[in-house]
Image: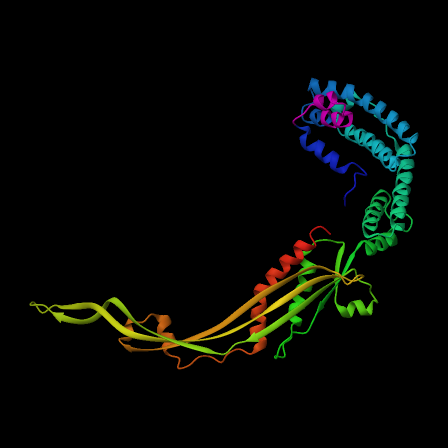
């Protein structure tokens, strides 16, 4: 509803896209006189001698005038219609558009030499339509609910599209949008456990997700500091708690296996004529691989809470693990049996230092973040 049918832009575009295929006769037979006129005019631009298009235009134009006048009179006599002036404004705007299109079609002017412009009627209806939408918006705003504020915002947008800057509509748009916006505070509890872990980076990532992926202009997320600064009364809290983050003991394992490689040059020999020949064979080695692993894991509990009632609206726990590993090796036998990767492993005598708990924690949150954002997206999809 961001684009309103105030000047019939979408309708005009749709008509013109199909006009080259139609003479307007079909729209005329259905009583759509406006579309019939536009299609006939467009056809006459590309085919000035098209008799069907000329006939459709000749019939549809006076019918369009008659329909517009009768419909405007009916709407003026129907005060119960909440947007009657907007409808009247659109009707006169359509007639003016027909006149503009005719002025750019020589063959059309042969059929309708003097098209009428409804300038005064249009301007009168414009003012009434803008005021009408403005008052509807005001009535919605007084209801004090978030949905009513969204409706008010759309009506203020409509008033502003009819007459840009109408009254104090710029300020009213801001007021309505603020009332319509679901205000969410993202609250992160310090990480539980024996380690001094910072989860600030994770909260920042979730903030970024809201700003880039939750494409809803009526949802806004705040940090606790922002909420305090603005003395904000939020609608909801998203509380993130990392539970039981632990780092296990370093474990080591050893595996010995035979490796071999075929078609390796193992020597040469001379034949009876004294010619040298290369000898190919299989080389072998015993490779012993040492592997160390360090496991870390925990749980993220995500809760969406109503601020007013402290009711948990939705909650989910996301378990996760991260296993750091490193390896080195030694061998006995022919080095040529080893792959390049195995040779590199054999150049090392021990494993690299294990990463600190903070680094393990960062890696542990990677898959949890993906699951959390799906949870958030699904919950706020219908807001």
Query: In the rendering, at what x and y percent does residue 17 appear?
Result: 68, 33
Query: In the rendering, at what x and y percent does residue 369 appear?
Result: 61, 63
User: Looking at the picture, does residue 310 appear above or below residue 135?
Assistant: below
* Residue drawn at point x = 69 percent, y = 28 percent: 19
* Residue drawn at point x = 90 percent, y = 32 percent: 121
Task: Say left or right for 357 vs 44.
Answer: left
Query: In the rendering, at what x and y percent does residue 323 appear?
Result: 50, 71
**Quadrant of the image for the N terminus?**
top right
Judging from the image, the colouring scheme is rainbow
Q: Is residue 354 magenta?
A: no
Give the image quarter of residue 208: bottom right
Residue segment shown in magenta? 21-40
Residue closest to the far left: 272
Residue closest to the far bottom: 349
Task: Say left or right for 177 vs 239.
Answer: right
Q: Is residue 29 magenta?
A: yes
* Residue drawn at point x = 62 percent, y = 57 percent: 374
Q: Nearer the viewer, residue 377 or 241?
A: 241
Q: Nearer the viewer, residue 234 or 111?
A: 234
Secondary structure predominantly adopted by residues drawn in magenta: helix
Task: Say left or right for 21 vs 88.
Answer: left
User: Looking at the picture, does residue 109 appear above or below residue 276?
Assistant: above
Q: How many marks?
A: 0
Task: Say left or right for 114 vs 255.
Answer: right
Q: Nearer the viewer, residue 291 or 302?
A: 302
Query: In the rendering, at what x and y percent does residue 191 appear?
Result: 65, 74
User: Looking at the picture, does residue 126 appear above or below residue 195?
Assistant: above
User: Looking at the picture, does residue 230 appear above or below residue 84?
Assistant: below
């Amino acid at each position: 509803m961001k684009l309103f049918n105030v000047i019939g832009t979408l309708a005009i575009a749709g008509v013109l896209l199909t006009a080259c295929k139609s003479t307007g006769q079909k729209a005329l037979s259905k009583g759509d006189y406006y579309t019939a006129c536009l299609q006939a005019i467009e056809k006459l631009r590309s085919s000035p001698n098209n008799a069907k298009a000329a006939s459709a235009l000749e019939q549809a134009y006076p019918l369009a005038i008659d329909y517009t006048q009768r419909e405007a009179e009916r709407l003026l006599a129907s005060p119960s219609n909440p947007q009657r002036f907007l409808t009247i404004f659109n009707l006169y705007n359509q007639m003016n558009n027909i006149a503009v299109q005719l002025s750019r079609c020589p063959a059309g002017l042969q059929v309708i030499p003097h098209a009428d412009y409804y300038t005064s009627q249009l301007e009168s209806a414009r003012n009434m339509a803008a005021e009408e939408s403005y008052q509807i918006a005001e009535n919605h705003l007084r209801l004090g609910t978030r949905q009513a504020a969204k409706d008010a915002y759309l009506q203020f947008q409509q008033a502003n599209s009819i007459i840009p800057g109408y009254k104090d509509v710029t300020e009213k748009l801001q007021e309505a949008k603020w009332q319509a916006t679901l205000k969410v505070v993202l609250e992160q509890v310090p990480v539980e456990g024996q380690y001094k872990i910072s989860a600030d980076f994770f909260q920042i990532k979730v903030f970024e997700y809201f700003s880039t992926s939750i494409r809803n202009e009526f949802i806004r997320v705040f940090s606790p500091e922002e909420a305090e600064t603005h003395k904000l009364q939020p609608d909801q809290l998203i509380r993130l708690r990392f539970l039981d983050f632990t780092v296990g003991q370093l474990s080591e394992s050893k595996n010995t296996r035979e490796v071999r490689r075929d078609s390796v040059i193992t020597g040469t020999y001379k034949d009876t004529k004294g010619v040298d020949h290369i000898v190919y064979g299989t080389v072998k080695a015993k490779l012993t691989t040492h592997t160390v692993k360090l496991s870390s894991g925990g749980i993220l509990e995500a809760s969406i809470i109503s601020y007013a009632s402290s009711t948990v609206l939705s909650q989910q726990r996301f378990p996760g693990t991260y296993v750091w590993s490193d390896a080195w090796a030694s061998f006995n036998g022919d080095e040529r049996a080893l792959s390049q990767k195995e040779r590199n492993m054999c150049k090392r005598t021990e494993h690299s230092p294990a990463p600190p708990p903070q680094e393990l924690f960062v890696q542990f949150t990677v898959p949890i973040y993906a699951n959390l954002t799906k949870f958030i997206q699904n919950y706020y999809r219908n807001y």
